[in-house]
């Protein structure tokens, strides 16, 4: 009998009971706004920011309305202005070039490697074109951060890390987001902790932190922040930074604090599922699994593989055959954007020359979510289905 998977690739786990209780407490007192506190009370948002700073090892943290807001706020706080050029990965999701373009800045795309990380050779050729690199750890794949930071430090290029897919990951034990000047994270439903929408940015830089807090709508109430620079830093710049309200509210902060505490255990669960898929797909003819470098501690919340040099019709056939058996795969090589699978040549507001290495990789790149509502056995079954269908199509040629 042909196997069919019956799980949902978009169903998340329930919000934990501790987070529900914390949310009900906030709803009970009604003080949802980030600065609406009782006398002597430290807001849920400020407490979450302390938790995030401790979790990442950063001096300062700011909780905001979305991961996209964190990216835009970080760029502006780092001094990016209209007309500036900003380096970024050619393989990323639309909010990354979107954050750059929304400031009136110009994305400069860098090629991707078969490891799905930024091509450091192409980056070396382009470092002189910009003063900021927004590095996307796309789909949780981390490049050689030691080499990248040495290159960027030598060229005086500020690194902002997009860690939407790497919260809880690390490179040589250093948490993702802590190599560059700023780390940005997302708490959107499909990321590693879930508040529907939300995000953080972290930094050790006094001025960047103060600018970000003022940008996020502090209304001169910056002294109510706990994971923040001292007041004298704000006093120097408080009249120069516009208010672009976007700090997180207390309800979402309350939901996130218990989830953040549980994240290390969740990472272990994700990685067990990732390993089950990788084991099941190993040595599948015509299918290449992305190699994970030894210094990388990753979070396996999604899975990617390459069908290098497969004809587009064959890839479409694989997606259709897997879908008929309940396995939902996404393809970054489709000529038209579909949901989140847009590519650099889909973003007409960020025109660029062709990137042949990236084009070849994206042409065969297949992507799949691994929600924690799947069991390890589910993931083994998914791998069997993909393996059977890919093998049959590859043998046909």
Image (cartoon, rainbow, N blue to C red):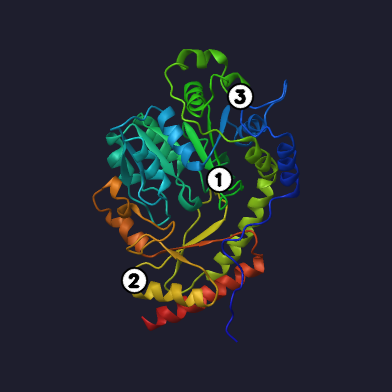
Pointer 3 local density, CA inside 10 Å: few below 14, some 14–19, many at least 20: many
The alpha-carbon separation of the residues under discs 2 and 1 comes to 34 Å
Please state the horizontal and vertical placement of residue 109, each as a whole percent of the image. Answer: 32, 46
Tell me: 7 left or right of 217.
right
Q: Can you name the residue that lies furthest to the bottom here?
A: 1
The residue depicted at 66 percent of the width and 65 percent of the height is 375
Identify the residue under disc 2: 312
SS for tag 3?
loop
Residue 244: percent from the left, percent from the top?
Answer: 46, 30
Relative to 98, 13 lies left or right:
right
Q: Which residue bears the numbered disc 3?
A: 225
- Name the residue: 26% across, 47% down: 351
Q: Which of 295 and 32 is in front in this view?
A: 32
Which residue is disc 1 drawn over? 197
The quadrant the N terminus occupies is bottom right
The structure residue drawn at horizontal position 41% and vertical position 44%, both measured from the top left corner, is 96
Query: x, y percentage for residue 273?
Result: 62, 62
Secondary element at tag 2: helix
Write down the quadrant of residue 252 in the picture. top right
For the residues marked 1 and 3, what is the alpha-carbon distance in whole angstroms? Answer: 21 Å
């Amino acid at each position: 009998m042909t196997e069919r998977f019956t799980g949902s690739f978009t169903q998340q786990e329930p919000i934990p009971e501790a987070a529900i209780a914390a949310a009900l407490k906030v709803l009970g007192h009604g003080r949802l706004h980030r600065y609406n506190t009782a006398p002597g009370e430290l807001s849920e948002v400020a407490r979450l920011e302390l938790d995030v700073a401790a979790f990442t090892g950063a001096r300062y943290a700011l909780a905001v309305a979305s991961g996209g807001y964190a990216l835009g706020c970080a760029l502006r706080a780092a001094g990016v202005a209209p007309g500036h050029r900003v380096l970024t990965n050619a393989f990323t999701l639309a909010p990354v070039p979107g954050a750059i373009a929304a400031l009136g800045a110009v994305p400069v795309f860098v090629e991707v490697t078969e490891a799905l990380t930024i091509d450091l050779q192409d980056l070396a050729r382009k470092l002189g074109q910009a003063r900021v690199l927004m590095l996307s750890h796309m789909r949780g794949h981390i490049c050689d951060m030691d080499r990248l930071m040495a290159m960027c430090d030598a060229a005086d290029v500020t690194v902002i890390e997009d860690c939407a897919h790497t919260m809880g990951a690390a490179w040589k034990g250093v948490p993702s987001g802590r190599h560059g000047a700023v780390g940005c994270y997302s708490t959107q439903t499909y990321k590693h902790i879930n508040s529907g929408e939300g995000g953080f940015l972290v930094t050790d830089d006094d001025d960047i932190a103060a600018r970000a807090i003022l940008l996020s709508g502090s209304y001169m109430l910056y002294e109510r922040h706990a994971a923040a620079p001292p007041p004298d830093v704000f006093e120097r710049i408080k009249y120069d930074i516009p208010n672009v309200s976007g700090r997180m509210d207390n309800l979402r902060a309350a939901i996130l604090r218990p989830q953040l505490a549980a994240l290390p255990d969740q990472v272990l669960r994700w990685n067990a599922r990732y390993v089950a898929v990788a084991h099941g797909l190993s040595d599948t003819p015509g299918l290449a699994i992305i190699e994970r470098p030894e210094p990388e501690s990753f979070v396996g919340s999604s899975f990617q593989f390459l069908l290098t040099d497969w004809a587009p019709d064959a890839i479409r056939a694989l997606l259709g055959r897997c879908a008929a058996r309940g396995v939902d795969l996404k393809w970054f090589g489709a000529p038209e954007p579909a949901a989140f699978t847009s590519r650099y040549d889909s973003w007409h507001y960020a025109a660029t020359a062709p990137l042949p290495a990236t084009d070849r990789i994206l042409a065969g790149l297949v992507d799949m979510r691994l929600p924690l509502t799947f069991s390890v056995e589910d993931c083994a079954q998914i791998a069997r289905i993909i393996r059977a269908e890919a093998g049959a199509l590859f043998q046909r040629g």
